[in-house]
């Protein structure tokens, strides 16, 4: 997360004073981690006006592969193998389903699908290294072969040019735009412990199909940290979710919460998820947050109505 | 830092209520990062009673080298090369000086120095990989050769057994114990941006020698994050620092602060460094921290006298 890359901050506080926290070191433990408190506070504790960000050297080798994976269990098996054999090099493990692929291909005309076979899931893998001595390509191919021998994967392709790399990524990244063109949507930004992703996907399908049979489920996201974007479109021939929006949000949020996960993985609370936060999080947690908010903005001047109900 | 590995926490609050923040996901942005606020708060905001910690797979390859480096600039050059060529594999870059080595060797009888030549600095490097296909040993040896050809390093050794690896580490890790046996000490836990370490070391020597000529300076630490333990012993034949303790602390803390660093890199403030925090940090920062403290412990029951003066 961005907060992990932030070394220093300058923040304008609610009383107009400016906090100069522009240090440039990773290790600073002179009291509370204010830089971490302000990051992700959605403007409710202060206005960030400067930041010092930790950079990484540009890698000297990069390979991108798209694999057609038979099922969700295969995604997990493959991700475990990638972590154990190539953990240091992994910069992306993006998964998506055949439903999401169809949504993208049907709605964004210029997209190209490079494989011969369609399966239920796909994994987009990117590996990088600063060293040119690491046999990165052969390591990745070896894992792809292993996954085929173990019947996890039926087809795959290694991007052979930057243009092809970009076209692989577009299959994943254009899904939100493709789905938007379908009409109404319910979007979820959920995280679960990566090893429990299959359990989440199984349970979530049951919940959705019980509440609204035929609802179109597009689950995609970041396999490495268990962050699933679980985006729904209405059943075929329908324009909306039959007023079930809130119950679907809350049931899926509840499921993530029960699984030690989060209903707000990377996009925060804003105004839209305040009720979910109040319902799904320990009231003690919400109260601690309210106390911190009040201590730094007792007049509630900073982004009122965000994170907490404005009363 | 440990806080970067914390996924979930359970914390007993000042009113006796228990916050259940035992989530097991890296990505949770449902409001303020309380897990990060409680970590490093030194017990002043709550009592941590449970934690969920992120683990990494055990590496399948590990190499440890000790290099004799000509000067502090050489340390920086070498660390840049290691970062750029072997960044993914680096798990330790510990530096120490010949003064520190002597302190360890003279005071801890069983230590063995494995090199033929003494230089002003030494770098202990550890590299690991999850993959056995990475030519880790030859990559490390190649960098060692490069550093010799470039006159940065005059001698070096690669640990050939676990026993030898441990004996290399003891040369670094026994320095605090060795120095303790010398008598009185002034210890500093400073961080500066890693690229400015030479500047820090140069300036700090000047400050110390101006204030107390002959003071024994043992600078060692973690090159990767610019964390220097700058530990002083009295000049030869003296038992103490001639009442200059506070002025030395404050001048070195001031230097680190001017260089966008920290006077409390990894060991926190406690009771000992409150005055330094009050003097060296922006009063606005101290005030923000006091407000947060008050909001979660308005009766000042939790570790009173730590982080702030107890008044």
Image (tube, coloured by chain):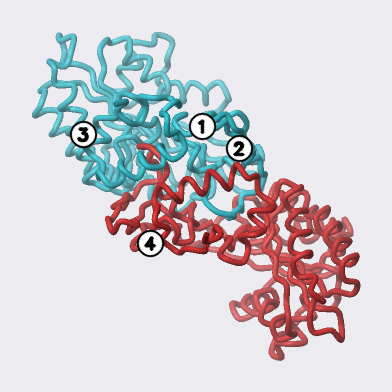
Chain colours: A cyan, B red
Quadrant location of residue A203? top left
Mark 2, mark 3: which one is toward the viewer? 2
Question: Foreground: B66 or A132?
Answer: B66
Q: Residues within 10 Å of mark 3 (few under 14, many from 20)?
A: many
Where disc 4 sits, the SS reads: strand
Residue carrying label 3: A252
Q: Are marks 2 and 1 in contact (CB under 8 Å)?
A: yes
Residue A282 x/y as whole percent: 25, 45
Q: Are marks 1 and 4 in contact (CB under 8 Å)?
A: no
- Label 1, secondary structure: give it: loop
x 57%, y 25%: residue: A161
For the point 69% across and 74% down, which residue is it? B172
Q: Which mark is residue A46?
A: 1
Which subunit holds the residue at mark 3? A
Query: Is B307 drawn above or below residue B36 in the view shown?
Result: below
> From the viewer's perspective, is A181 left or right of A83?
left
Q: Which residue is mark 2?
A: A19
Query: How far apart in space, not on screen, are marks 1 and 4 (Cα)?
Result: 27 Å
Specify the quadrant of the image occupied by residue B31: top left
Q: Are marks 2 and 1 on the same chain?
A: yes
């Amino acid at each position: 997360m961005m907060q992990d890359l932030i070394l220093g901050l300058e923040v304008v506080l609610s009383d107009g004073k400016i906090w100069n926290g522009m240090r440039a070191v990773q290790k600073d433990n002179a009291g509370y981690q204010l830089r971490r408190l302000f990051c992700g506070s959605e403007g409710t504790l202060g206005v960030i006006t400067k930041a010092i960000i930790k950079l990484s050297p540009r890698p000297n080798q990069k390979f991108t592969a798209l694999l057609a994976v038979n099922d969700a269990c295969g995604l997990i098996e493959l991700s475990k193998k990638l972590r154990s054999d190539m953990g240091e090099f992994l910069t992306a493990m993006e998964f998506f389903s055949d439903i999401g692929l169809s949504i993208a291909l049907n709605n964004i005309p210029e997209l190209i699908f490079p494989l011969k076979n369609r399966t239920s899931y796909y994994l987009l893998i990117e590996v990088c290294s600063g060293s040119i001595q690491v046999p990165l390509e052969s390591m990745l191919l070896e894992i792809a072969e292993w996954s085929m021998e173990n019947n996890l994967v039926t087809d795959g392709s290694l991007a052979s040019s930057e243009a092809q790399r970009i076209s692989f990524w577009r299959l994943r990244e254009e899904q939100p735009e493709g789905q938007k063109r379908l009409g109404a949507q319910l979007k979820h930004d959920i995280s679960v412990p990566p090893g429990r992703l299959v359990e989440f996907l199984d349970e979530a399908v049951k919940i959705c199909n019980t509440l609204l049979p035929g609802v179109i489920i597009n689950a995609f996201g970041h396999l490495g940290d268990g962050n699933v974007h679980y985006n729904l479109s209405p059943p075929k021939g329908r324009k909306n979710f039959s007023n079930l929006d809130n119950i679907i949000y809350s049931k899926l949020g509840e499921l993530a919460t029960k699984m030690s996960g989060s209903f707000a993985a990377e996009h925060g609370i804003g105004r839209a998820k305040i009720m979910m936060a109040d319902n799904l999080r320990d009231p003690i947690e919400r109260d601690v947050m309210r106390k911190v908010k009040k201590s730094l903005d007792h007049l509630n001047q900073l982004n009122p109505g965000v994170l907490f109900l404005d009363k």
